[in-house]
Image (tube, rainbow, N blue to C red):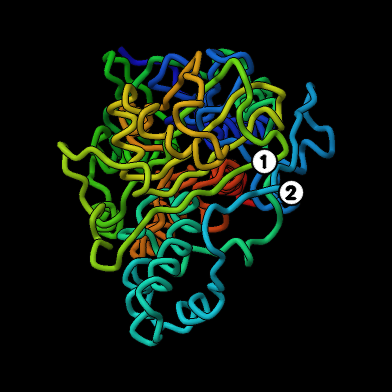
Amino acid sequence: MSQPNPNVIIVGAGISGIKAAVDLKSNGVNALILEGRDRIGGRLVATHETSVSLDLGASWFHRVPDNVLYEKVINKEYKSPVEFTFDDSNVKIMAKPVDLLPFWQFVKSQPQDDTLRNFVYKYLQTTKLNEVDTQDFIKFVRGTSEIGGAGNWCYISGKNAVPPSETQGRDAFVTSTYAQILQQEASYLDPFQIITSSKVTEIIKNTASSTYTVKTSSGVTYSADFVIVTVPLGVLKSDDISFTPPLPTSISSQLNKVQMGNIAKVIFEFETVFWDETVDKWLLFPETHPEEGNKFGHLPLEYEPSSSEFTALVCNIFKSKSAKILVTLVSAPIAIYLEAHPQEAWNLLKPMYSQISACDESEIPKPVKQVVTSWSLDPFSKGSVSATGPEDIPLIKEFIQGVGNLRFAGEHTSDVARTQAHGAYLTGQREASFIIRDIYKC
């Protein structure tokens, strides 16, 4: 069954797809969004299972004030006010401080990128640290890099593991949720411009007419002059969408090298607050011995991790939203384990809560509510964000160049704010601008 033909078909109703459609509409270009889920938003979605709504995906305005979404909030461009708070005034790092500046200078001086782990061991060969100082050094490097890198140090890029001391701008926690921002962005579109529960399975370029045919799992087909693919990197890697002709090797070969990252969120709500109410966040580091550095390169299915073996960021929602809630972020591969075994979350994280509260584990009350994300199990994301590895920059350039009128958007295609919501937003703007220029020859 064929449907009326828009000028542009956008695959995916996340923030990049929504932004592209809004810009196209405002410039008189007919765009239609096909979304596989039964809702819009992609990875911008909130849970309402706790006493206050909390984002399961993106939660912060990063790099404030250099963040377009933050600027829209400050300039009061949204119909409903968006609330946020800076939650970086009292952050407790649960480890011995280590000066990493010489290490980051060493990383920058290297001619080629490498994994963070490999850079660490190359650097350690140039130092005379004893065993204890070596352990402290490794803990600090991993602890300040793995959450932001959305992966284990065995994979993430060393050159892109920007230390907190060199990060530009601040991070603001969106207390009213990113999901609310997404809904306000989508309000500029007409309801008929978004079709949910419409999973795209194939994109075919018609060589005779230079148009595209887009097929869905329900058997409905669409045609358009342009297609913008905004599905996450994990979906692109899985070949859930076939391309005819196949994607050029400059893209397909790189897809085999890069990885989708995973950051899991574990949300616990309690009847009482047993932690320091004044602290914004706690950063807990893994206990790592040099000889065990590659332990989590590939996590065995039967492996049961310990709370002392991975990085965790614990956020105090009582301070930001007056709710008796702790939200804990962990990165892959432990994130994958927790999402597959949510019933293990309390036992695994409880020792951490003992550490941040100085309470004995027996004194910590059991949570009354628990929510664990499932991004790694979600067929429409297959991970939470793209992990930044040493091989990724060439692929980003290929995504930006596109394949003729087959375009790509999403956080994994951003060269300015990868893994971040405003980066995804800007890629939607970028691809809409490309199409508008091409149509109007301006």
Which residue is painted at 32% across and 22% down in the image? 343
Residue 399 in view in this figure: yes
Q: Is residue 290 left or right of residue 134?
A: left
Instruction: State the SS at label 1.
Output: loop
Q: Residues within 10 Å of mark 2 (few under 14, many from 20)?
A: few
Question: What residue lies at 33% left-to-right and 29% top-to-bottom?
Answer: 339
Q: Position of residue 312 (x, y in %)?
A: 46, 44
Residue 214 visible to an observer of this rendering: no
Q: Position of residue 411 (x, y in %)?
A: 49, 45
Residue at position x 63%, y 40% from top? 60
In the rendered image of this protein, does residue 150 appear above or below residue 33?
Answer: below
Of residues 308 and 125, the one nearer the viewer is 308
Camera-side residue: 51 or 68? 51
Q: x%, y% of residue 219?
A: 26, 15
Pointer 1 local density, CA inside 10 Å: few below 14, some 14–19, many at least 20: many
On screen, 349 above or below 331? Answer: above
Identified by mark 1, the residue type is Asp
Figure check: 188 above or below 411: above
Q: Position of residue 160 (x, y in %)?
A: 47, 64
Give the amino acid at mark 2: Ser
Q: Which mark is residue 89?
A: 2
- What residue do we see at 51% from left, 21% from top? 365
Regarding mark 2 in the picture, which secondary structure is present there? Answer: loop
Quadrant of the rendered image containing residue 51: top right
Q: Which mark is residue 280?
A: 1
* Disc 1 and disc 2 in contact, CB within 8 angstroms: yes
Q: Quick one: label 1 or label 2, which is nearer the N terminus?
A: 2
Q: Name the quadrant of the N terminus.
A: top left
Q: In the figure, residue 134 lies in which quadrant? A: bottom left
